[in-house]
Amino acid sequence: MWKGMSRRHSLLEPLDKRPAKNSKLLRLTASGGPVFSRADFADPFTDVTAKAGVAGGGWSVSAGFFDYDNDSHLDLFVTRYMEWDTKHSKACGGAWRTYCPPAEFPATTNLLYRNRGDVKKGRALGVAFADYDDGFMDVFVANDGMQQYLFHNNGNGTFTECGLESGAALSADGKPLSGMGTVFQDYDNDGKPDVLVTVLPREIYGLYHNDGAGLFTARSLETGLGTLTAGSSGWGIGLEDFDDDGWKDLLVAQSHVLENVEAIDQSLHYLEPPLLALNQNGRFERADSGITIPVAGPGLAFGDLNNDGWMDAVLTVLGGHPLVLMNHGGKRHWLTITLRGTRSNRDGLGARVRVNGQTRFATTGGSYLSSNDKRLHFGLGDANTATAEIWWPSGTRQTVKDVRADQFLEIREPEQS
Ligand SMILES: [Ca+2]
Ligand SMILES: [Ca+2]
Ligand SMILES: [Ca+2]
Ligand SMILES: [Ca+2]
C-alpha cells in the first residue's frame, strides 16, 4: 500500500559541471518574453534567444517542446498570460487591495515558433500536448477566467481552435474556468488522452473525458473531483502512477492566488498542502501525500529522481525552498521506457506508447511552469512481464514482447518501417 512521500527541505542536486558533449539548452519564461540560454559550462549560460529566433515580448508562462509537423525537429510552444506591464498595472478589491481578475487586462496571443496557424487570443497559463485523433500532436491551453482552448493540429502546419465544439472549453454547467495548470494523458486506460485543468475554488478542477471522434465530456463530478477540489486552488498537476497499480494517479500543487484571501473569505486558504488522489478504476480518492504543512506551491515537476521505479516529484514553493517529494515505493512491478527516435525526433516526443493496457504520450510538457522526466513510466501491478507497443511520430509502429518488469528499457525506433 502507498505509504506517502517523505519531505526533504533540500534543493535538487546541483547541475553536473563536467564539460558536456552536447551543450544543454535551458529555457526560461518570464514577464518580458521568453529567454533561451545555452549552457555548455565552458561558457555557461550564453543567451541565444535572438539567435534561436525565439525572442517575443510579453508575459510568458508555461512552455513545452513538441514536434507539431512530424519533421523530427522539436518546435516550441510558449503560453502568454495577458497584455500587462508595470506601467499599466492596477489594484482591485477595493479596501482589500488584491490582484485584479484577468478580465481587467486585454488577452494576448500564445507563441508557436514556426506557427502559421491560429493566433486566437487568450489568457494562457498552462499548456500540454497529445494527439487525440490523427497522428499529429494537438495542444491544450489552460486559459484564466475564460474558455479553455484546444488547438487541433490540421496536419498541414496550421491549427484550428476547437475547444467549444469539442466540449473541452467550459465547465459541465457552461461556465468559464480559471484555468492554470493542465495535463493531457489517459486517466481511464481507454487508450485516448483526456484533459485535466486546475482552477480556483468554487469551480472544481476540470476533467474532460475524451469520448473519441474529437469530442470531450466534462466528468469532474463523476470522477470524484467535486468534493476533492471545490474548495481548493490548483496549479501544477500530473497524472502519474505513484503506487504502480496500473492506474495513473493525481498530484496537484495547490494554494490560492491571493495572499489575503482568508481576510476576504474565511472558508478559503492561501496556503494549502498538495493534493494526492489515487485512481481507483477511473475514480479519484484522496490519499496521504505525507505533506501536512500547507505551502504556496505553484510549480510541480514529475520524474523518477532516484531511478527506483517509483515516480517522485519536485514542488516549487513561493518564498521558500523547493520540496523534493521522494516516493517510498512498495512491492508492485513497473517498467520505464526511454525512446530513441531515428526517423522521429531523437526523444520520440509525441509517440503513443501502450504497455499492458495503459497508454502514455511521450512528452515533457504539462503541469504548470514545469518540465517533466522524458522517460515513460508504467506501473505493472502484479505482472512480471510486459508488451510495449509504440506508435512513433514518423508513423512507424513497433511491438516489443516479453519485456521483463522492473527495468529501464531503451527502445530504438526501427530505421525502416
Ligand atoms: Ca491530432
Ligand atoms: Ca481516456
Ligand atoms: Ca495508481
Ligand atoms: Ca523514485
Image: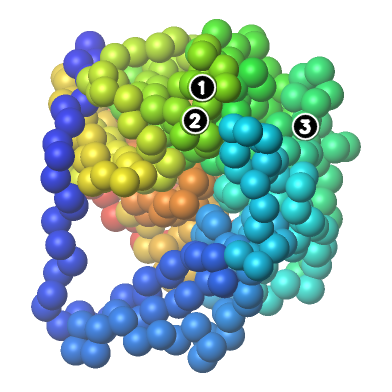
Proximity of marks 3 and 2: CB atoms separated by less than 8 Å: no
Q: Disc 2 marks which residue?
A: 260
| Mark 2 vs ligand 3: CB below 8 Å | no
The residue nearer to you, when weighing 94 against 171, is 94
Q: Is residue 287 left or right of residue 166?
A: left
Relative image position of residue 355 (x, y in whole percent)? 42, 35
Relative image position of residue 270 (x, y in whole percent)? 45, 28
Residue at 76% in and 47% down:
104
Q: How many marks?
A: 3
Q: Is residue 61 above or below residue 103?
A: below
Residue at 44% in and 86% down:
48
Q: Is residue 351 visible?
A: yes
Residue at 41% in and 85% down:
47
Frontmost of labels 1 and 3 is 1
Q: Residues within 10 Å of mark 1 (few under 14, many from 20)?
A: few
Relative image position of residue 368 (x, y in whole percent)? 49, 46
The C terminus appears in which quarter of the rendering? bottom right
Q: Disc 1 marks which residue?
A: 263
Q: Disc 3 marks which residue?
A: 176
| Mark 3 vs ligand 2: CB below 8 Å | no
Q: Is residue 113 above or below residue 47?
A: above
Relative image position of residue 5 (x, y in whole percent)? 21, 26
C-alpha gap between disc 1 and disc 2: 6 Å
